[in-house]
Image: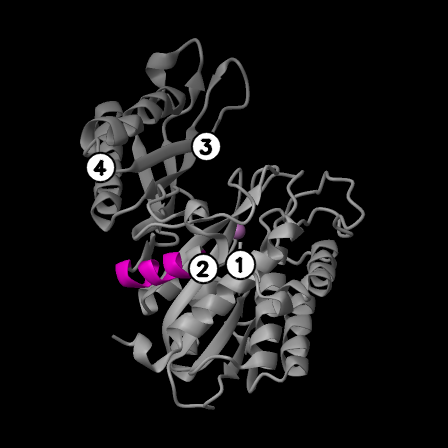
Amino acid sequence: MTIDPRILSLKDEVKAWRRDFHMHPEIGYEVHRTAGIVAEKLRAFGCDEVLEGIGKTGVVGLIHGRNGPGGRVVGLRADMDALPISEETNLPHASKISGKMHACGHDGHTATLLGAAKFLASTREFEGSVAVIFQPAEEGGAGGKAMVDDGMMDRFKIIEVYGMHNMPGMAAGAFAMCPGPIMAAADQFIIQIEGRGAHAAQPHQGIDPVLIGGHLLTALQSIASRNADPLKSVVVSTTMFHAGTAFNIIPQRAELTGTVRTLEAEMRDLAEGRMRDIVAGLARMFGAEITLDYQRGYPATVNAARETRYAAAAARAVAGDAQVNDDAAPLMGGEDFSYMLEARPGSYVFIGNGETAGLHHPAYDFNDDILPAGMQYWAEIARARTAANAAG
Ligand code: NI
């Protein structure tokens, strides 16, 4: 691993920031304390511009390189929000706020990018400019979309954008990425079955929404197994099935809720279309009224091929060839950096968190030992991608 000694010397300071963020988790757009600290530090580092309140509570710092403004501007993005989970780590820096926890390591992402900003602002050993992007509400609130919709890309003239997320179970400080989709589109469906309630002993007088729900549950599994090309990814998970109040009553209604994950637009359309057909068909078959509320969530996170080669090269410069997998398998989770990648070419990579509890688990903690590798990766991207000759 090749880490600049000046970055290594920042490790203890950045670790203290990380642990402070960890002790004070904030959810969604309510990241006021975190965003305030981020903005205050960016100003203290001497960033050339610091803009708060973009995408509600997002923060962007602009750092010009040695030639001042006017060159290529590259965006580096971290997320700041925590999750509504009660922490079960017993660590000295465990969450002080009950029911909230940094269980996805966004505390680490924010601290890493802040550390990189400090390094970049104090050294200025690059040509164009770097926009450090701190977004709220990654966990379901589409904070990345809010920042893009607020005009962030044009406002700072960002031409490429890069993201990084830690990954438990991957060697600490190793990197993984792939060109094309790396994270899935994450949609939600809510299906309401309106039957006809009846005495359980007189089923012929009712329309049983529990039976219909059972057929529906099974039929939905045929989307992935019978409709989708076996070489393409579709996940259909029904995660809630609510109906009934007593053992001797056929209920009036039932509700099924779940999620659909896909990597390609074509498969997303297929899944939604088949779901509509299945619902309509079962409604006819059983004489019930069935409604489908299909809500498209985050789109797939699609890495640009060229920028992913640059990301892999930066990762190799940090971690060495053996610790970089540039042909990693995508994950079916969702990620709202997808909106930034829809706006500009770029790449989203994983950095290994070592053998820790998984993301969104109450025993999870970000691994402070990977802070320097993360900072060095950002410094490498900044140096390589702001260079005037990087355009070609
Ligand atoms: Ni996350």
- Pick the residue in front: 214 or 239: 239
Label placed on residue 274: 4
Q: Which residues are magenta?
A: 305-315
Q: CA distance from mark 1 to mark 2?
A: 7 Å
Label 1 vs 4, first from the N-terminus: 1
Is residue 171 depicted above or below 238 in this figure? below
Secondary element type, mark 4? helix
Residue occupying image coordinates x 67% and y 76% = 41
- In this picture, residue 219 sits left or right of residue 318: left
Residue occupying image coordinates x 63% and y 78% = 42
Residue sitting farthest toward the top: 201
Q: Position of residue 380 (x, y in %)?
A: 46, 67
Amino acid carrying label 4: it is Arg
Residue occupying image coordinates x 39% and y 52% = 297
Graded by Cα atoms within 10 Å as few (under 14), some (14 to 19) or many (20 or more), the crowding at tag 1 reads few
Q: CA distance from mark 4 to mark 3?
A: 18 Å
Which residue is identified by label 2?
317
Amino acid carrying label 2: it is Ala
Graded by Cα atoms within 10 Å as few (under 14), some (14 to 19) or many (20 or more), the crowding at tag 2 reads some
Is the magenta region chiefly helix, strand or loop? helix
Q: Position of residue 263 (x, y in %)?
A: 30, 46
Label 4 vs 3, first from the N-terminus: 3
Amino acid carrying label 1: it is Thr
Amino acid carrying label 3: it is Thr
Which residue is identified by label 3?
239
